Every structure is written in structure tokens, then in C-alpha cells.
Image (cartoon, rainbow, N blue to C red):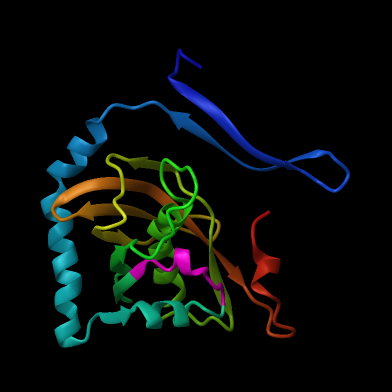
């Protein structure tokens, strides 16, 4: 639609009977770099919040997880292919639901013809799910939080497999058991990508029997 500078995209496949089935959809909007400029003007405030989260390690108000700890903690809910294990470290404040993450992509295989490798996009969203499922107030025997998409997403500069990136989010409660968080992606001091309103939905688990997480996934 040239009038709105947008395009509707549907992700579909054929089922066993040869009929098309829709899995998801999104709207592509053709934008300039104004959002990056706006976010960059606020970058010093986001960096200050990231420093506060890290400073909490010393007094015990935040917890640091290295890569093995991150994926071991989330293993009851999901197991990730090695290409999708890009998180090197997470520092989490369970009280404010703020988290800082460090990621690198040297182990992601470069096969395929992608503008941005799917493993990179996926890993940049993992922080929100980790924050909700691994904070001190969450009991995974009673409740789990699953990714429910995002409101908007822009990559302002190509993500380099040889660089180290940092991200920040703070999760906030919405309606209908949905929690939302924006994710700001930094290359050093520069903001290079942004997820707006990543949604994570809470699902209560029956005490008996305990279902597989796949039974709670959104179709």
C-alpha cells in the first residue's frame, strides 16, 4: 500500500491435505531513521539504568547469570539449538523486572541468505521471556510465560557476527495476563536496533497432571 507506505505479510504453509494454513502475520512499514535519532537522544538515560542494574550485583539486589546458567534456568520450558544460544550474560533485578543482557554471534552459522539471521532476531527477544520466567517471584510449577510477539521492530544497522551487543528491558504488566517490555540494542554507545512492546503471556499450570509446554503455545 503505497499510500500508507506499508505491506501486509502472511506466513503460511500447506497442511497434509494441501490446504493453506496461516501461522502468523505482520505489517511492514517503510520508515526513515527518525526513531533511531530519537532513541539515541535518550540513550544516556537507558545506559544509566543499565549501570544501576549492574551495580546491584555488589549489594545483592540483582543476580548475574552466565550463558550456561541462562539456558539451564530456561531449560524446563525450551531447549535452544546452538545457533540460538547467543546470550553471554544476563543481570536481572527481580524486584523491578529490569534486565541487562550481553550477546555475541560468533558461533551462529552464517549459512543461508538472510538480511538478518533468524537466530539473531530470536536471541534479541529472549531477554523478556527470561525476565518473566526466571525472576525470584515466578514459580514455574504454577505459571509459565510464553512469547506472544511484539508491537514493532526495527534494525537500524546490520548486526555484525563479530561484535558484542548489549540490551536492556523492563517488563511491565498489561491486561489479559500480558506483560510488555521494550528492548533497546546497543553496539557500544550506539543504538542499532529496537523492539517495541515485546509481549509475554502468563499461563497458569494445573497442578496435576503437568502438561508439556508445547500444549500452551499460541497457535
Is 188 positioned to the left or the right of 31 in the image?
Answer: left
Above-or-below relation of 136 to 188: below
Relative to the observer, which residue lies in front, 211 or 166?
A: 166
Q: Specify the farthest residue to the front.
A: 111
Please say whether residue 50 is visible from this viewpoint: yes
Q: Who's the residue at 45% across and 57% down the image? A: 119
Residue lying at 23% horizontally and 30% vertically, measured from the top left: 34
Can see residue 135?
no
Residue 167 pos. (x, y %): 27, 59
Where is residue 45 drawn, in percent x and y? Answer: 13, 54
Residue 200 lies, in percent from the top left, at: 49, 60
Magenta: main secondary structure equals: loop
In the image, is 176 to the left or to the right of 5? right
Q: Give coordinates of residue 192: x percent, y percent.
A: 25, 46
Residue 84 is a magenta residue: yes
Which quadrant: the C terminus? bottom right
Q: Report the span colored magenta.
A: 77-87
Is 106 drawn above or below residue 121 in the view shown? Answer: below
User: Which residue occupies 88% across, 44% down?
Assistant: 17
Tell me if residue 115 comes above or below residue 122 in the rendering: above
Give the image quarter of residue 208. bottom right
Q: Nearer the viewer, residue 97 or 21?
A: 21
Amino acid at each position: 500500500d503505497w499510500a500508507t507506505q506499508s505491506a501486509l505479510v502472511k506466513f503460511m504453509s500447506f497442511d497434509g491435505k494441501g490446504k493453506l494454513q496461516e501461522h502468523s502475520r505482520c505489517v511492514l512499514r517503510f520508515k526513515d531513521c527518525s526513531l533511531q535519532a530519537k532513541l539515541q537522544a535518550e540513550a544516556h538515560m537507558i545506559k544509566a539504568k543499565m549501570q544501576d542494574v549492574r551495580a546491584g550485583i555488589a549489594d545483592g539486589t540483582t543476580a548475574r547469570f552466565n550463558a550456561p546458567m541462562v539456558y539451564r534456568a530456561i531449560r524446563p520450558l525450551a531447549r535452544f539449538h546452538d545457533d540460538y544460544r547467543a546470550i553471554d550474560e544476563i543481570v536481572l533485578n527481580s524486584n523491578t523486572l529490569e534486565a541487562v543482557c550481553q550477546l555475541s554471534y560468533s558461533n551462529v552459522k552464517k549459512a543461508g541468505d538472510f538480511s538478518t539471521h533468524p537466530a539473531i532476531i530470536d536471541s534479541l527477544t529472549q531477554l523478556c521471556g527470561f525476565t518473566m520466567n526466571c525472576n525470584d517471584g515466578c514459580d514455574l510449577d504454577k505459571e509459565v510465560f510464553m512469547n506472544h510477539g511484539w508491537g514493532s521492530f526495527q534494525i537500524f544497522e546490520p548486526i555484525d557476527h563479530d561484535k558484542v551487543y548489549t540490551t536492556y528491558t523492563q517488563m511491565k504488566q498489561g491486561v489479559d495476563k500480558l506483560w510488555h517490555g521494550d528492548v533497546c540494542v546497543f553496539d557500544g554507545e550506539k543504538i542499532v536496533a529496537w523492539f517495541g512492546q515485546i509481549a509475554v503471556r502468563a499461563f497458569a499450570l494445573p497442578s496435576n497432571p503437568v502438561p508439556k509446554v508445547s500444549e500452551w503455545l499460541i497457535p
